[in-house]
């Protein structure tokens, strides 16, 4: 239950210390700043800023009792309103995005050169790269190092796979024994109807990072041994050559 509450509050844009403060108010009721500080081990000077942020987000309220300032968690009706507000915003964004996408794509095609090299850092950067694949107009192909779910999160990847399927995209990848080691052995998972996988012996090809090739993009991902980064190379010649190399390896690889 605590995990679900934390996940819910994160979706309402609360950070870790804000969640801790809010949960203390849920557990203990109306508290002064001093009492909150003792419950959470957060310094009072810091709590003042946290409480101000929580009030601006609408999840806590001020209470004055005999000239003593206290705070309490907002009533459930307030949370229900915040959820409805989030849904309204999300619906608006979804309605507007197709036109915004056209406007931005047109501006980028005019303003940016034919070749781009984009760097991404951290988990959110890798997630953005993975999500960019959903814009593919051609088949996606590449090399799988390890299970990407372990880094970007299973829920994120499940959502991505649903989008990939709904957009009727197609894909192929090649993996080695390193992938099976990373998931604890081979599993008899059936291929997606829209994604095919082949295996190649790591003595023939060592796959040490993830790569996706689609349209005029070659994307490289690395998220192991303390190095978390991604690179997207937007260049037609580079992507064409990488796709040709992939087809050679694909022909030499075995069915999964």
Image: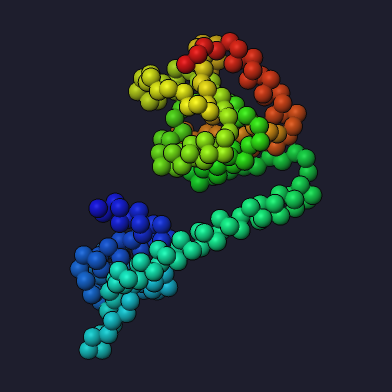
Q: Does 227 sit above or below residue 253?
A: below
Name the residue: 50% across, 26% down: 193
Give coordinates of residue 225: x percent, y percent. 45, 33
Spot the residue most to the bottom. 66
* Residue at figure coordinates x 24%, y 66% from the top left: 26
Can you give x and y, in whole percent of width and height, for residue 67 in the image? 26, 89
Q: Residue at x 79, y 49 (%)?
A: 110
Pick the front one: 29 or 41: 29
Is residue 255 at all visible to an observer of this figure?
yes
Looking at the image, which is closer to me, 189 or 68?
189
Identify the colour scheme used: rainbow
Q: Depth check: give the residue in front, 116 or 130.
A: 130
Q: Is residue 78 left or right of residue 95?
A: left
As displayed, is residue 83 above or below residue 164? below
Q: What is the x, y in percent for residue 69?
A: 28, 82
Look at the image and tell me whether residue 229 can be seen: no
């Amino acid at each position: 239950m605590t995990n679900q509450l934390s996940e819910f509050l994160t979706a309402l844009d609360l950070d870790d210390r804000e969640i801790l403060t809010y949960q203390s108010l849920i557990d203990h009721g109306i508290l002064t700043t001093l009492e909150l500080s003792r419950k959470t081990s957060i310094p009072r000077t810091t709590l003042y800023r946290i409480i101000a942020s929580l009030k601006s987000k609408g999840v806590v309220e001020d209470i004055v009792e005999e000239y003593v300032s206290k705070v309490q968690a907002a009533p459930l009706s307030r949370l229900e309103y915040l959820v409805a507000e989030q849904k309204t915003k999300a619906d608006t964004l979804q309605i507007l995005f197709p036109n915004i996408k056209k406007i931005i794509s047109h501006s980028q095609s005019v303003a940016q050169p034919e070749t781009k090299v984009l760097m991404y850092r951290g988990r959110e950067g890798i997630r953005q790269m993975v999500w960019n694949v959903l814009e593919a107009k051609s088949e996606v192909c590449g090399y799988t190092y390890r299970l990407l779910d372990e880094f970007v999160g299973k829920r994120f990847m499940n959502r991505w796979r649903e989008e990939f399927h709904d957009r009727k995209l197609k894909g192929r990848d090649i993996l080695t024994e390193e992938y099976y080691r990373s998931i604890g052995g081979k599993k008899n998972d059936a291929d997606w109807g829209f994604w095919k996988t082949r295996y190649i012996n790591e003595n023939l090809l060592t796959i040490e990072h993830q790569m996706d090739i689609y349209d005029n993009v070659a994307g490289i991902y690395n998220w192991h041994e303390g190095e978390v980064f991604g690179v997207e190379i937007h260049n037609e010649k580079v992507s064409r050559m990488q796709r040709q190399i992939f087809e050679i390896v694909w022909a030499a690889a075995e069915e999964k």
